[in-house]
């Protein structure tokens, strides 16, 4: 010990120099050898390449792989560095041979570098190939051997070696030159790639074919000599042709690649995409695009979600159109006018809050609320229609009336809970038009909402009548995504399972496209709850459908917002929806959440809870909150004479001779339209003449509504036409008298329509009086 102390004491300078050299040697190798940008890569759930985006420096450079293909490892070692696993960073024999050959030729003819040294040289790009540089590489190579294992060094090399042109790394080269993964290459293909880094500027597929062929075959000969491959494999390998030109990398999900590049730039992303399904959906979109573009409709988006896992199974962000029609725009996450696609959310909310029952009658009549005048798509009215049929038929007027009844703020609360991110303003900004497309949303949010609602029903049954706290979550396109539904609880998350089940039951009855007519009569048909939407001006066509296992969302239109005739949800988007569902496995229909339901008596004609006067009773299953709904307002007890020809009362008819009968009767305006399509509807008999003074609410304006603004129409000659006013009366044959302001203008009987030509613009009062003295008024504003 003393001798050692004396040695260090007597050789301080020498020891200091050694220490400095050791410290320099330790820190001589940079922590990060390669910091170049890499391509963003997306793979399907089963590991197939969906697409790749070139790195920011213009190179095809895949992210570092975790493994080296067996064939390439054998080929590159035999070609570049046969003693790779035996040396410690450099090969003295090779160096001596190279030095001797270069000295005799007065130039650098042979390198003698090991694979480890080549890694160092690649990391020190731009350095001249001099003997001094070689010494640096040798020192750094030994340091590299201290830091990494042989396998890791080989991984670094295979990821950063040049393969000609702008191709870097074995994986990029494999896809560019052979169109598949490196592990799937033959021995001949692998040998071709193994010789490329040796001289990438001279030997390039499609050029210098003879030199490339000789190098490849020489390597194959060495492989057979080293007993790595057998003679038969060699004989077959040398017969294989060389690649003639680079392949284009797959672009099977280009818009998902955009999304991944924004979120995981330069990474290898394994997605949840079903490779086969993605290709089939691409084909479906291409087929429909070829047809729709004839009508100048150029853009389509399709999203397929797995309900149980919340993973994306197919992602088509746009159709295969051209740049002039914005083919690179990912429409799935772009805000578009919703049309009628939000109606199921309102229907479910009203069921959830006990505001309606599935068959509750909703008024379907000409409607004006303040300055808002909604109309049905077909511009027809049913007078009254059940809430479920109004949803299935996507009727606009009942939807607006339901929203007005439910409350704009209450419905807005539900939409915010659904996390529809493009609904950014307050409820009053949208008004009642919110339910008909006054707001914007995107295909991602709409589809995820259906998936979340479907999952609520599924989980309710699986959890024995309970709910997950985090049922409404964001889907993911990542393969390793695990949905976190949170804790199990008795309370619903947003909608109760019963409301959603009844909503889907109504949506299952939506009329399908022509190719899907009479679907219910075929055993092979899928039971699908689905909804379409069409925005104002025919700019957006939507179709979203769900089964217990899958949600398919479709949007069709023009990315620039141009409307087109025929751009309607059921015509443009629905056929795509059902074509996609045909590619998906069959699913069972949703299980009925019996624990949410109770059986209650309802009025068959009105759909309300039965009152004492309902004559036909249905017993239906609804949520317990359905008991909160009011009893039937349309059935009442009426008093008739003994012939049942007239209504009577005590002032005009003996009580002992009266007949008391239950009667289903609607308001005058509802009745006017309802009886046109309901032949069994019976109008209340008239009152006896001396009893008529008790009749109330017998008339209603069809047009104009109170406080309406009327623009006087003009014909082709510029002449102002008359305005036709219309009236509904419970007793059609009654004579009524019309007044404009205080001026009498005419009389009508049976058909209560009259043409009026106001001579002055501004405010006017229309007054109608029937022959029994009943009177109604409407204040209007005439404008040009």
Image (spheres, rainbow, N blue to C red):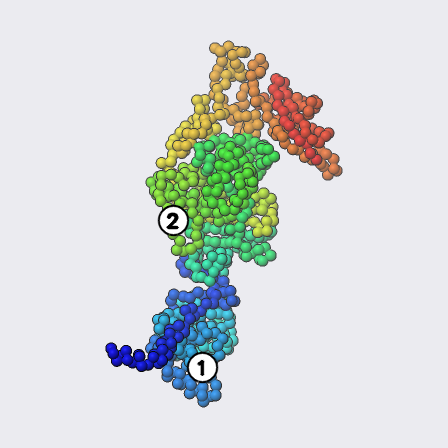
**Mark 1 touches mark 2? (CB < 8 Å):** no
Q: Callout 2 environment at 10 Å: few (<14), some (14 to 19), or many (20+)?
A: few
The one of 113 and 663 positioned closer to us in this rendering: 113
Of the two numbered discs 1 and 2 on the same chain, state the one appearing first in sequence: 1
The one of 41 and 281 positioned closer to us in this rendering: 41
Who's the residue at 58% across and 16% down the image? Answer: 693
> In the current view of this chain or complex, which residue is farthest to the left?
1
Q: Callout 1 environment at 10 Å: few (<14), some (14 to 19), or many (20+)?
A: few
403 is higher (above) or lower (below) than 333: above
Q: Nearer the viewer, mark 1 or mark 2?
A: 1
The one of 739 and 294 positioned closer to us in this rendering: 739
476 is higher (above) or lower (below) than 247: above
Q: Is residue 364 left or right of residue 77?
A: right
Residue 676 visible somewhere in the drawing? no
The residue indicated by pointer 2 is 484
Image x and y of residue 193, in percent: 44, 73
Who's the residue at 71% across and 31% down the image? Answer: 761
Q: Secondary structure at mark 2?
A: loop
Image x and y of residue 225, in percent: 35, 79
Q: Which mark is residue 132?
A: 1
Split into 4 quadrants, where in the image is the C terminus? Answer: top right
263 is higher (above) or lower (below) than 96: above
681 is higher (above) or lower (below) than 173: above
Q: Secondary structure at mark 1?
A: helix
Q: CA distance from mark 1 to mark 2?
A: 59 Å
Image x and y of residue 405, in percent: 51, 32
């Amino acid at each position: 010990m003393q001798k050692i102390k004396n040695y260090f004491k007597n050789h301080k300078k020498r020891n200091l120099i050694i220490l400095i050299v050791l410290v320099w040697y330790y820190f001589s190798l940079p922590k990060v050898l390669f910091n170049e940008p890499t391509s963003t890569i997306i793979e399907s759930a089963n590991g197939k390449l969906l697409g790749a985006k070139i790195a920011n420096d213009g190179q095809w450079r895949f992210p570092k792989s975790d493994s080296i293909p067996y064939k390439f490892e054998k080929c590159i070692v035999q070609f570049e560095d046969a003693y790779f696993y035996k040396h410690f960073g450099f090969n003295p024999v090779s160096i001596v041979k190279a030095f001797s050959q270069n000295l005799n030729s007065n130039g650098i003819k042979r390198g003698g570098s090991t694979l480890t040294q080549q890694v160092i040289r690649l990391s020190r790009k731009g350095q001249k190939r001099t003997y001094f540089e070689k010494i640096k590489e040798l020192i750094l190579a030994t340091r590299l051997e201290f830091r990494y294992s042989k396998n890791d060094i080989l991984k670094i090399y295979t990821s950063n070696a040049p393969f000609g042109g702008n191709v870097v790394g074995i994986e990029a080269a494999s896809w560019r030159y052979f169109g598949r993964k490196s592990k799937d290459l033959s021995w001949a293909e692998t040998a071709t790639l193994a010789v490329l880094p040796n001289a990438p500027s001279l030997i390039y597929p499609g050029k210098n074919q003879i030199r490339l062929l000789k190098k490849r075959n020489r390597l194959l000969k060495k492989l057979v000599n080293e007993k790595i491959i057998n003679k038969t494999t060699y004989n077959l390998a040398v017969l294989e042709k060389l690649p003639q030109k680079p392949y284009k990398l797959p672009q099977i999900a280009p818009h998902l690649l955009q999304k991944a590049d924004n979120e995981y730039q330069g990474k290898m992303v394994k997605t949840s995409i079903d490779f086969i399904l993605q290709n089939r959906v691409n084909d479906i979109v291409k087929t429909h695009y070829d047809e729709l573009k004839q009508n100048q409709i150029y853009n389509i988006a399709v999203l397929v979600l797995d309900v149980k896992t919340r993973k994306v199974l197919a992602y088509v962000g746009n159709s295969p159109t051209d740049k002039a029609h914005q083919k690179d725009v990912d429409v799935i996450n772009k805000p578009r006018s919703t049309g009628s696609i939000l109606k199921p959310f309102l229907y479910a909310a009203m069921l959830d809050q006990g505001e309606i029952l599935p068959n509750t009658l909703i008024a379907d009549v000409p409607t004006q609320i303040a300055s808002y005048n909604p109309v049905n798509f077909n511009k027809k009215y049913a007078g009254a229609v059940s809430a479920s049929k109004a949803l299935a038929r996507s009727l606009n007027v009942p939807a607006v009336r339901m929203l007005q009844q439910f409350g704009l703020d209450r419905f807005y609360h539900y939409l915010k809970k659904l996390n529809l991110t493009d609904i950014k303003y307050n409820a009053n900004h949208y008004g009642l038009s919110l339910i008909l497309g006054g707001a914007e949303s995107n295909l991602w949010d709409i589809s995820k909402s259906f998936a979340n609602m479907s999952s609520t029903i599924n989980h309710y049954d699986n959890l024995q009548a309970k709910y997950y706290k985090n049922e409404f979550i964001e889907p993911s396109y990542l393969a390793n995504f695990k949905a976190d539904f949170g804790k199990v609880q008795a309370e619903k998350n947003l909608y109760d399972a019963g409301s959603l089940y009844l909503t889907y039951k109504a949506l299952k009855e939506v009329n399908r496209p022509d190719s899907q007519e009479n679907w219910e009569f075929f055993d092979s048909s899928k039971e699908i709850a689905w909804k379409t939407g069409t925005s104002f001006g025919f700019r957006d066509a939507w179709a979203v459908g769900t089964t217990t296992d899958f949600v398919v969302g479709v949007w069709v239109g023009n990315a620039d917002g141009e409307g087109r005739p025929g751009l309607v949800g059921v015509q443009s988007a629905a056929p795509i929806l059902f074509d996609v569902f045909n590619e998906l496995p069959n699913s069972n229909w949703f299980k009925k959440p019996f624990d949410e339901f109770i059986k209650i008596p309802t009025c068959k004609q009105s759909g309300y809870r039965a009152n004492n006067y309902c004559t036909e009773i249905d017993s239906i299953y609804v949520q317990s909150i359905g008991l909160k709904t009011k009893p039937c307002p349309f059935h009442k007890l009426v008093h008739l004479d003994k012939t049942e020809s007239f209504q009577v009362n005590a002032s005009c008819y003996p009580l002992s001779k009266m007949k008391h009968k239950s009667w289903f009767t609607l308001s005058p305006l509802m009745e006017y339209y309802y009886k046109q399509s309901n032949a069994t509807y019976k109008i209340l008999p008239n009152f006896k003449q001396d009893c008529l003074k008790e009749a109330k609410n017998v008339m209603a304006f069809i047009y104009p509504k109170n406080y309406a603004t009327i623009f006087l129409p003009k014909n082709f000659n510029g002449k102002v036409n008359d305005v036709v006013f219309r009236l509904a009366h419970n007793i059609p044959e009654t004579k009524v008298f019309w007044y404009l302001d205080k001026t009498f203008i005419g009389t009508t009987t049976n058909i209560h329509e009259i043409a009026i030509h106001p001579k002055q613009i501004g405010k006017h009062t229309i007054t109608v009086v029937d022959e029994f003295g009943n009177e109604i008024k409407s204040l209007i504003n005439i404008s040009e």
